[in-house]
């Protein structure tokens, strides 16, 4: 993982990046269940799942969200930080043994409402697909990003919410 400095002005709407694949394992699901306390049978009970429409255990949506966002975190940028996520949709289930890949595309840049000379928001559409090319999750990742010449810094606790 490299450290890069990308300011608000460096991002271009339309730029894309893609990841290599990652296979979701039973261990991923069991660990996530333990971390979250979500032991619902959809994830943990193979016999019960056999009686349901999908016929097999599926990964937690929040697991796939975490993995997909993590897969896009290839560089450390001290000029930008995650501000949150919008429009999260679990489009199709992910099963044990599925391999997901992720594409992230910059879709929007906005000035910070209270401190537009110092900060901006960069919106990135994150789309994960399985090995068949089916979309499994889509969301918008929001970043708060320093502007060149601004006095604030997203890493200093200096930034204020809009």
Image: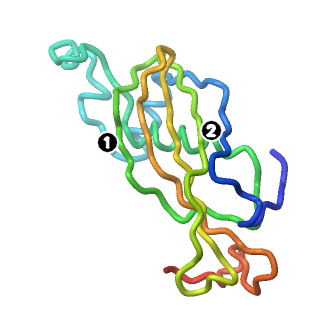
How is the rendered protein coloured? rainbow
Front disc: 2 or 1: 2
Give the secondary structure at mark 1. Answer: loop
Image coordinates for residue 73, horizontal then vertical, percent: 67, 46
Q: In this orientation, which residue lies closer to the viewer: 58 or 123?
A: 123
Q: In this orientation, which residue lies closer to the viewer: 17 or 63?
A: 17
Category of crowding for the residue at label 2, using alpha-carbon neighbours closer than 10 angstroms: few (below 14), some (14–19), many (at least 20): many
Instruction: Give the residue number, with chain letter if any, for mark 1.
Output: 38
Position of the N terminus by quadrant: top right
* Spatial separation of the CA atoms under disc 2 and disc 1: 23 Å
Horizontal side, residue 111 vs residue 96: left or right:
right
Q: Is residue 58 depicted above or below 53 in this figure?
A: below
Q: Is residue 75 depicted above or below 39 in this figure?
A: below
**Quarter of the rendering containing residue 35:** top left
**Quarter of the rendering containing residue 76:** bottom right
Residue at the extreme left of the image, as rendered? 51
Horizontal side, residue 67 vs residue 49: left or right:
right
Give the secondary structure at mark 2. Answer: helix
Say which residue appears at 44% left-offset and 39% top-offset: 63
Q: Mark 1 or mark 2, which is nearer the start of the sequence?
A: 1
Image coordinates for residue 135, horizontal then vertical, percent: 43, 28
Image coordinates for residue 131, horizontal then vertical, percent: 51, 16
Image coordinates for residue 111, horizontal then vertical, percent: 59, 75
Say which residue appears at 55% left-offset and 21% top-offset: 23
Horizontal side, residue 143 vs residue 38: left or right:
right
- Specify the label residue 71 is tagged with: 2
Total numbered circles: 2
Q: In this orientation, which residue lies closer to the viewer: 84 or 6?
A: 6
């Amino acid at each position: 993982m490299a450290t890069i400095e990308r300011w608000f002005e460096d991002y271009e709407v339309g730029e894309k990046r893609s990841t290599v694949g990652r296979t979701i394992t039973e261990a991923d699901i069991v660990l996530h269940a333990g971390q979250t306390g979500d032991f619902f049978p959809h994830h943990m009970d193979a016999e019960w799942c056999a009686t349901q429409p999908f016929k097999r255990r599926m990964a937690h949506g929040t697991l796939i969200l975490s993995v997909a966002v993590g897969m896009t975190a290839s560089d450390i940028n001290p000029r930008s930080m995650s501000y949150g996520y919008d429009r999260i949709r679990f489009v199709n289930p992910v099963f044990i043994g599925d391999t997901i890949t992720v594409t992230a595309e910059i879709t929007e840049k906005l000035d910070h409402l209270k401190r537009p000379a110092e900060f901006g928001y960069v919106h990135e559409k994150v789309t994960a697909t399985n090995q068949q090319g089916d979309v499994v999750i889509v969301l918008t990742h929001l970043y708060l990003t320093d502007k060149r010449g601004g006095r604030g810094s997203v890493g200093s606790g200096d930034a204020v919410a809009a």
